[in-house]
Image: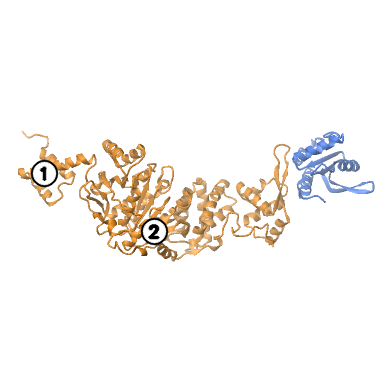
Chain colours: A orange, B blue
Amino acid sequence: MRSDKPSQTTLDLLYGVQNDLLEDPVGRAMRRVIQMEVAENTEIGWLRERVTKHKNAQMYAGPFRQIGKTQGEIVHGVDDKDRPIRQAAQGMGAHTLTLGGSGSGKTTRSRWTILQAAKHVKGLFLFDFRKREYRCLVPWFAAMGLVLKVVPARSLRLNPLEVPRHVPPYSWATRVADVLVQVFRLPARAAKLINVTLIELFERFGVTQGGLRFPTLFDLREAVSVKASANAQARMAVIDALDPVLMSLRSVLCYRRGWSTTDLAKHQIVFELDGVGEVEKDLILSSLILPEFTSRVAAGVSNKRMSLLVCCDEAARLVSASGTGIGDLIGLIRGTGIGLELSIQSADIAPAILSNTANKFIGRCGSASDYSTIAEAMGLTAEQRRYMAQHLVPGQFVGQLAEGPGRSPFWLRVPYLDFSKPPSPKTVQGHSTLAGLLPAVGASMDTADSSAGLAELLALPTEVASEFTDWSPNGHPTSQASPVSSSAVPLLSDTESRFLRAVINHPGKPSSAYAKLAGVGTHQAIALRKQLVQQGYLREHRVNNSSRGRGSIVLEPLPRALAAIEGKEN
Amino acid sequence: MRGGYLHNVILIAVLSDLFELEGWHTDQEVPVRMGSTIRFVDLVAEREGYCIAIEAECSAKRIEGDLDKAQAIGSQELWIVTPTARIAESVRRKLDRLYVPVNRDGLFVLTQGAATERVMNKLPHFAGS
């Protein structure tokens, strides 16, 4: 009678197939004869031997599967037998997430991967959000015959309102409005205000007719501030959010035409954003990634080979569950040929990030909840989770790749390379995986000058908005001497003129009444009042213009104000 | 008019406009002969033969002169209007020292707000207007 229970040989065969033990010519022959049921004891013995050997090795390797021989250009690391774990460079287009506490080796892993990927992608954007971790790759790139350009945040030349190629201006206005609302954490109503204002600006600048002279964020700020009919809260929120950023990034944003992301995507660049605030970082990142992505989508690019790899070190703010950073984009950009590599320290991550990063690596973490979150996302068993939490040391990771045998979680070790020193034959000695990676190692490192690369970027075509190079929120150039000490009557901004005119035409009102009369927000009116008093245009009087309560401030226009308004009207 | 912006515009002009709005006839800087000199009352409001003299004061220095001017012009009421409650209080103290009762016999010391409210409440004498 035939038993329903599979034979030991069948079970061994299944195990062998599942664990890629029969991929070599002998293994394939063994598989064939066993499947044809013509196997002799010799073949069955060989199979048994392979399976037993693998099971024994697996016992020492822990609960993670040994994925065996892998193929591809990128070596993520080595397994416990120093066999390289490889992946095709294009597999990185499925996005990579690395989670690990401080000192776990995630930056070394990231550098290691970038070094290999650099030869396979046209453009490389490396974002250093908090430290300067990627700068040290410059000599390594030079050794490979590549130029890695290092761009500090304040050397950038950007115009977030510049309409990317192939994108209709009206669509871009809506898109930018949403992004600004997200970046600046503005109320939803501000999105409508920004959208409408942007469309008006695009029409005024002739962008809708195909013009290439784009409005800047400064134009947007000025246009919003004089929009008296707009919702006051939304308007003030936009102004309050824009002012500090425009002040901080004045030299970056005062361009009608900044660096085109299409041009930048042909270069390999490190963006060092450690010197700017968090909101500024978000704005710069959005300004660099969003136009390129939108342009590719508008051009009909779909499922293209990865040509741009974007790496973000310490990207916690961008991917956090509470933030809106790039969570909205990540699901869409893969198909446009952009790959993302993100490194973070904790698992406070937006679900969209976990769902859309097919390559995952987890290193040593300080918190069980971090292990738990990522283990759930990687589909680890309880045993694997426990093992991982207790055995990971710096430089070791549990990984999962987008495709191939690496889909099963595996254990890997990233070879240590001292990136603080320039590459030399001695540095790479003993790293068999580096063979062929650095063909020019030993070349003179003196040529690895990051400033030379920056000069190449600075030569890209741009158009400066010179009227905003000295911009300040109060309408006066920052370098201008104080009007009080100057004998000449300085130019007044439109807002200041309106405020002064309101004071002259409506005397005796409490100072709070002038906000509405001048068509400005309450906070702006207070700032204007103080500024104009300081500049000698107005004098304040305290008057009890009600029978109860605290007195109001009543404003007296001084001769300087009368002269300024008269001069303006003439 | 010899006062500054606060005296002329904030106190007098605003009150004058308000009186006019309420149907009063007003005159600013009304001359009053006092012996051999001519003095001026800041604002005089008249309606149906009822006369109010209004003096805007930014300090308590000239109170006695205000009382004399009001008497000379023959007004039924004298309002001493000050920009702040603090100045109004110092005026009241000065009047106390002069044994002049305040808020009685047609003498009122008011802040600008209180004076405005008094005009807008149509004054007790013209409650029906």
Q: Please give the residue where the numbered disc 2 appears in the rendered image.
A: A269
Q: Is mark 2 on a helix, strand or loop?
A: strand
User: What subunit carries mark 1?
Assistant: A
**Which part of the image, by quadrant, shows the N terminus of chain A?**
top left
Classify mark 1: residues with Cα within 10 Å, few (<14), some (14-19) or many (20+).
many
Q: Where is residue A4 in the image (x, y as percent from the top left)?
A: 11, 34
Task: From the viewer's side, name the closer residue of A55 and B13.
Answer: A55
Q: Give left or right: position of B38 versus A385.
A: right
Spatial separation of the CA atoms under disc 2 and disc 1: 51 Å
Amino acid bearing label 2: Ile
Q: Position of residue A257 (x, y in %)?
A: 48, 62
Task: From the viewer's side, name the closer residue of A562 and A188.
Answer: A562
Query: Could you tell me which residue is drawn at 85 percent across and 35 percent down?
Result: B97
Q: Give left or right: position of A496 versus A112.
A: right
Query: Could you tell me which residue is drawn at 67 percent across and 60 percent down?
Result: A486
Q: Please give the residue where the numbered disc 1 appears in the rendered image.
A: A47
Residue A140, by quadrant, is: bottom left
Q: Which of marks 2 and 1 is nearer the N terminus?
A: 1
Amino acid bearing label 1: Leu
